[in-house]
Amino acid sequence: MPTHNDIVMRLDVKVPMRDQTPLSTDLYLPHTSDPVPTILIRTPYSNNLDASIATARRYANDGYACALQDCRGRWDSQGDYYPFREGADGYDTQQWIGQQDWSNGKIGMAGGSYLGAVQWASAPHKSPHLTCMAPRVICCDYRDGLVFPGGALQLNVMMTWGMRTNARTGQNIDFHHWNSAFHHLPMIDMDEAAGRDLNFWKDWIRHPDYGPYWEEFDDEQRYGAIAAPAFNMGGWYDLYAAQTFTNFNGLRLQGGSAEAQQSKLVVGPWPHALSASTRTGDIDFGAQSLYDLDGAEMRWFDYWLKGIDNGIVDEPPLELFIMGINQWRSEWEWPLARTEWRAAYFDSDGRANSVIGDGRLSFAEPQGAEADHFTYDPRYPVQTLGGNNCCSPHIVPWGPYDQRPAEMRGDVLCYTSDPLAADLEVTGPIQVVLYAASDGRDTDWTAKLVDVAPSGYAMNLCDGIIRARYREDRCEAKLLEPDAVYEYTIEVGVTGNVFKKGHRIRVDISSSNFPRFDRNPNTGNEYGLDAELRTAQQTVFHSKARPSHILLPVIPATDRE
């Protein structure tokens, strides 16, 4: 068995790109004269981090070459950095590796978050050397999947992550006054108010619509050009939870080769850091929630890059951790074929405001008042309490937390079921269909699915948002007619959870979730360019004619026995 002393290191190798920009690449090679497969890891976070070096040495000790490369404009690589513009550099690096005497011509890519983004960006360029990928916690459509989900800016992530990656080296953001920064208006110069001048921030604010700017950063439209299979890894509380399933289905159903259609996915009860702890937010999911992701990844590479017939592609492609019962389960497709889609309807006697109101959730059609009302004042938005956040949990926490502090507000409508007479599994994508009106020309609608224990503890499972101006078309904003009733579809996210007997299902509806998302000023003005705010009067309908509801993917109980 090789030891660390058998590794050959070649540090700061300058790999030329097509425009002759040199990218700094550290090579960790097994001590052998035979050509070997390569694991390529491209990063904006420095190729000299202890964790990255340990990973590279582990691969080299297992008979792989490992190339750790600083992305363009970051650390020891030359050129100018611009987020997610990585496809050509990835391809050029793969072509360079394929020509080296220590390479056998086969490449696998590894890494999570941005290190996953560079994998998807390079794959459609079709290097013959890219054989497989293992992307963790990332999307492929950066407008809808990251920057403007549902049309609202994912403020906390974009500002904190953007400021960390703005300069050539890492930037400390721990001493910023984030509460003040997040409230600054206009949005276009929020970066300057926080102490940086981010050219890409201003580009994002100037492009809230999906269009040519975002098409460059949308690899969902290029699944058919990808021949390399992907072993995806994600978490129910990761900000890319839903998009991880989109990527899995994208290659399974549209991949450009038979190999790509053998892609896999594992999802646990984890935040962006994945299987780093048994605890996420308030909840300890137990030792069984941990998963040997590195071991699974190595099996994946051994199969595709070394030709070791370890059976990994013959196993079910999905491994899901089902919360509530805290058990792993193997599946074959997403959504699950045996899903029973059930609508749970909102109802009340007209005062669903807060958790102590009279809001009800039922599988029967609504019988009470026609609507509920609340006032949304963007000066006092509903605070984010955990959820699918990233990447600074000390600034905005991630994961499951008790939602009752937010649910005590009058501008949060709470619709809660009776205690369940038996366990109810909900595993799949979650949607809310909302019939609502606002007296503004634009506004936001938020939805959150909550598991309420007999003690009253209200555990968030997933949440989403829709910006009203994008209710019909993400490519073109269409303002509201004040007080007109519209139908909205809110993508609430994904979950795998058993609501235990005696628990209750709750849906929270409001118009803000801050600072996870930016505040809608309710004015209908051009996005991000002014500081005007107005209070909006909001109405949520739940009559038989306008039956607002949540669509739950219920898994029959017999399938869990």
Image (spheres, helix red, strand yellow):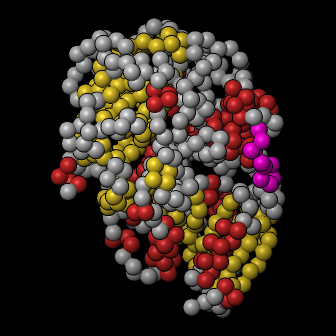
In the image, taking residue 373 as reference, residue 426 lies left or right, namely left
Check the picture and name the quadrant holding the C terminus: bottom left
Which residue is nearer to you in this view: 445 or 68?
445
Q: In the rendered structure, does residue 532 fall within the stretch colored magenta?
A: no
Residue 215: x percent and y percent?
A: 58, 41
Residue 213, compared with residue 415, is above or below; it is below
Question: What's the magenta region?
Answer: 167-176
For the stretch drawn in magenta, what is the main secondary structure? loop
Residue 556: x percent and y percent?
A: 20, 47
Residue 548: x percent and y percent?
A: 33, 22
Q: Residue furthest left?
A: 558
Check the picture and name the quadrant holding the N terminus: bottom right
Asked whether residue 18 appears in the rendered view, the answer is no
Residue 23: x percent and y percent?
A: 77, 64
The residue at 55%/52% (across/down) is 272
Residue 155, compared with residue 305, is above or below; it is above
Residue 78, compared with residue 32, is above or below; it is above
In the image, taking residue 553 as reference, residue 103 lies left or right, namely right
Which residue is nearer to you in this view: 32 or 379?
379
Asked whether residue 408 appears in the rendered view, the answer is yes
The residue at 36%/50% (across/down) is 323
